[in-house]
Image (spheres, grey):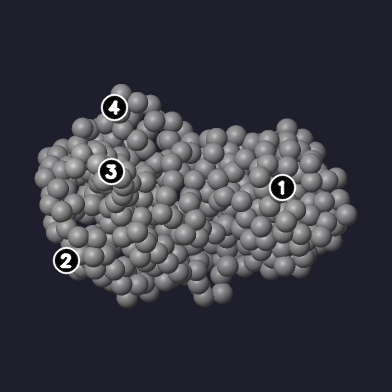
Amino acid sequence: MPEVFQTISPVDGRVYVERSYAQLQDIDHTLNQAQQIQMEWQATSIDERAQICRKAVHYLVAHSNKLAQELTWQMGRPIRYTPNEILGGLQERAIHMIDIAASALAEESLEDGNQFKKVIKHGALGTILVLAPWNYPYLTSINAIIPALMAGNTVILKHSQQTPLCAESYADAFNNAGLPAGVFQYLHMTHTQVAKVVVDSRIDFVSFTGSVEGGYAIQEAVGKRFMRTGLELGGKDPAYVRADADLSYCSEQIADGAFFNSGQSCCGVERIYVHTEVYDQFLEAFLSATTQLNLDDPTKADTTLGPMIKPTAAAFVTDQIDAALAMGARPLVDVRSFPNHEVKRGYMAPQVLVDVDHRMSIMQDETFGPAVGIMKVKDDAEAVHLMNDSRYGLTASIWTQDLERGEVLGKSIQTGTLFINRCDYLDPSLAWSGVKDSGIGISLSHLGYLQVTRPKSFHIKK
């Protein structure tokens, strides 16, 4: 087994971080410590937990400039955006989940006359293993970490090898907040080590954000135990522009949803369906928004499109585009208009394809890069049919001024979240979930607490 790993920065290809993998004894100690301290942590009040978690969030916010710089160098998102992952998303989600914990975890009393007392209490599961990805390393992990801790669980975080400093920043934040030793820990592990920890009896729940293949592997592994998982997997999220949509507004919003983070978003827009009556106008506006992106070094303040995570990822998107072109698709963006376009370095210009159909991988398989296909549709029925013609179902968006009609259509769309006139956003007051190959389980909202707790019924005869 290798003893160390390196994080290669997508910014310039150099080694940005080098860390040692955990040794067997380190993993064993971490699991034991988490298990031993869990009941003590569970015995604390929700107010005590909230005070510590708030202090940890405030620490991360106070150090957001430093963390943003590290984040840009680790995964390539432009520096103009990385601070908001902490100042916006992480802070918003964490504080909301802390604020609603008391009500979400409150016991439910079901009185039955004078003879019986019936109560349902929500207890912690135990130790939760959080497996977090690199594309939104703080946003994805906070969804699991804060609810788990607020519910009285202990947490072990294994972060992507591309963003190891994020795990260490969490540890710094919780240490600064006075969290008891062992309640939150992290481990840098190999895939083989992770596979062993997933099935370890000292782990009571696995929260995973990543690929469909990774989700299937975890599901198969834990199938040998009676243990739940939360799996947020891939997406091929559609957008439908109706004939009555505000084109100047929706073209800019959908372009942002498609190309933000270089398209490396599970809930990013990857396919667009436009009513035939406004197809040409939408294309013109969408292409204008796309070509205004500035592909460049992400450490520069004016860069709006940074490199993809690895050159191999850019090569995958390029191959998907080439396959579509071979089947009759037509590109609208001349990549030569983006001087820094260089797939071998991972710097990839955005691409918009038309004359596409569902025979093509670009309209069926997750792209996870700055490329999107646009199809013309004749009516709502065709749009809904095409939106549902996918193995994925994380989010979908409808763009219309007829909100009532949008809600009616939304009921027929197979998705975890249905947006109307917005996209690519997680509101922590709403349940975050997926259908089909986009995963199972729920995070965020009061329902997210059901995932990290176990109901216990008290049936008392007076």
Q: Quadrant of residue 29?
A: top left
Gap between marks 3 and 1 measured at Cα: 41 Å
Q: Residue at x 28, y 35 (%)?
A: 198
Task: Specify whether 395 is left or right of 278.
Answer: left
- Give percent across and percent down for residue 363: 68, 40
Q: Quadrant of residue 74?
A: bottom left
Please say whether residue 202 is visible from this viewpoint. Answer: yes
Gap between marks 3 and 2 measured at Cα: 37 Å
Judged from this view, the residue extending furthest toward the right is 277
The disc placed on residue 118 is: 3
Task: Specify whether 6 is left or right of 273.
Answer: left
Q: Residue at x 48, y 51 (%)?
A: 431
Please tell me whether mark 4 or mark 1 is closer to you in this view: 1
Q: Residue at x 62, y 67 (%)?
A: 294
Amino acid carrying label 4: it is Arg
> Helix or strand or loop: what does disc 3 sit on?
strand
Please say whether residue 348 is visible from this viewpoint. Answer: no
Gap between marks 4 and 3 measured at Cα: 30 Å
Amino acid carrying label 3: it is Lys
Please tell me whether mark 1 or mark 2 is closer to you in this view: 1
Which residue is denoted by mark 4 in the rendering? 225
The disc placed on residue 409 is: 1
Task: Specify whether 369 is left or right of 84.
Answer: right
Mark 2 nearby-residue class (10 Å; few <14, some 14–19, many ≥20):
few
Amino acid carrying label 1: it is Leu
- Give percent across and percent down for residue 305: 57, 63
Sequence order check, earlier mark of 4 and 3: 3
87 to 391, vertically: above or below:
below
- Give percent across and percent down for residue 275: 82, 51
The disc placed on residue 141 is: none
Amino acid carrying label 2: it is Gly
- Give percent across and percent down for residue 164: 31, 54
